[in-house]
């Protein structure tokens, strides 16, 4: 997770474990679910494997609402207490987000080891262009003749097969990991978001 901030603003970007696991569960169980916005399959692709202890149909029914909650959680400020943060995390069996989702609650421990093996195959990307984000804010402040208004922006990155850039809320974007590598895209697409918030 990359964080850039000043006294008046904070931008957090990077992958999120729960978001990755939710997409992995979708792909590994071959769930037929719609997401809004559309989120492509993970990259690298995930082999389909449904453990005998997993009720795939029930997971499929519960997954869309859980996915929405996972995305909201990715943008939220978690509790400062580490134990509370762990207990509330969307992929922990004690999470309130799983209280009414017994199929997902039981599927997670049954698939956790396979997910761990999958994550070991995913190439790690070094955070890039962090200074460009700071530059965008500095350029805007110079143009406005004032410091940016206080704002917070979260960009949750996902490793998917294709390009993704979707605004989920005023302060939350969902993006494929490669978005940050294209400076002209960052200026064209992120610049207006920062302008609106600042």
Image (cartoon, rainbow, N blue to C red):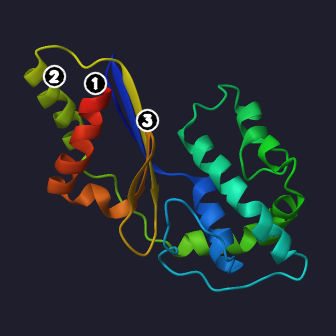
Is there CB contact under 8 Å for labels 3 and 1? Answer: no
Q: Residue shown at 78%/50% (left/top)?
A: 92
Q: Percent from the top left, x then y, of residue 126?
A: 34, 57
In the rendered view, does 155 fall on the left or right side of 61?
A: left
Mark 3 lies on a secondary structure that is loop
Image-based side of 175 in relation to 112, left or right: left
Residue at coordinates 29% horizontally, 38% vertically from top-left? 193
**Nearer to us in this view, 103 or 94:** 103
Q: Residue furthest top?
A: 146
Mark identifier at residue 141: 2
Q: Is residue 129 left or right of residue 85?
A: left
Q: Position of residue 90 (x, y in %)?
A: 72, 48
Q: Who comes first in sequence, dot 3 or dot 1?
A: 3
Q: Which residue is mark 3?
A: 171
Pointer 3 with pointer 2, Cβ within 8 A: no
Q: Of circles 1 and 2, which is in front?
A: 1
Residue 121 position within the rendered picture, expressed as x and y whole percent measured from the top left: 53, 76
Q: Which residue is mark 1?
A: 198
**In the image, is residue 10 above or below residue 162?**
above
Classify 10 Å Cα crowding around label 1: few (below 14), some (14-19), many (20 and above). Answer: some
CB contact under 8 Å: marks 1 and 2: yes
Residue 114, quarter of the rendered image: bottom right
Left or right placement of residue 194 versus residue 18 in this view: left
Up/down of 80 relative to 146, above or below: below
Residue 155: x percent and y percent? 42, 46
Sequence-first tag of 3 and 2: 2
Residue 182 against residue 131 in the figure, above or below = below
Residue under the point 65% across and 56% down: 67
Q: CA distance from mark 3 to mark 1?
A: 11 Å
> What quarter of the picture does the C terminus occupy?
top left
For the residues labelled 3 and 2, the Cα–Cα distance comes to: 19 Å
Quadrant in which residue 164 is drawn? bottom left
């Amino acid at each position: 997770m990359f964080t850039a901030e000043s006294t008046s603003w904070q931008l957090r970007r990077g992958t999120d474990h729960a978001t990755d696991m939710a997409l992995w569960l979708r792909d590994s169980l071959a769930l037929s679910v719609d997401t809004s916005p559309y989120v492509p399959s993970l990259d690298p692709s995930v082999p389909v494997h449904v453990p005998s202890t997993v009720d795939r149909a029930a997971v499929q029914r519960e997954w869309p609402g859980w996915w929405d909650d996972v995305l909201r959680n990715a943008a939220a400020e978690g509790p400062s207490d580490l134990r509370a943060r762990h207990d509330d995390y969307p992929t922990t069996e004690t999470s309130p987000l799983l209280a009414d989702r017994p199929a997902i609650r039981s599927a997670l421990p049954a698939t956790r080891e396979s997910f761990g093996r999958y994550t070991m195959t995913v190439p790690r990307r070094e955070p890039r262009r962090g200074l460009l984000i700071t530059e965008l804010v500095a350029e805007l402040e110079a143009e406005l003749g004032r410091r940016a208004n206080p704002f917070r922006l979260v960009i949750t990155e996902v490793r998917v097969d294709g390009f993704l850039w979707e605004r989920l809320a005023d302060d939350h974007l969902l993006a494929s990991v490669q978005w940050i590598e294209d400076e002209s895209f960052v200026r064209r697409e992120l610049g207006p978001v920062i302008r609106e918030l600042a």
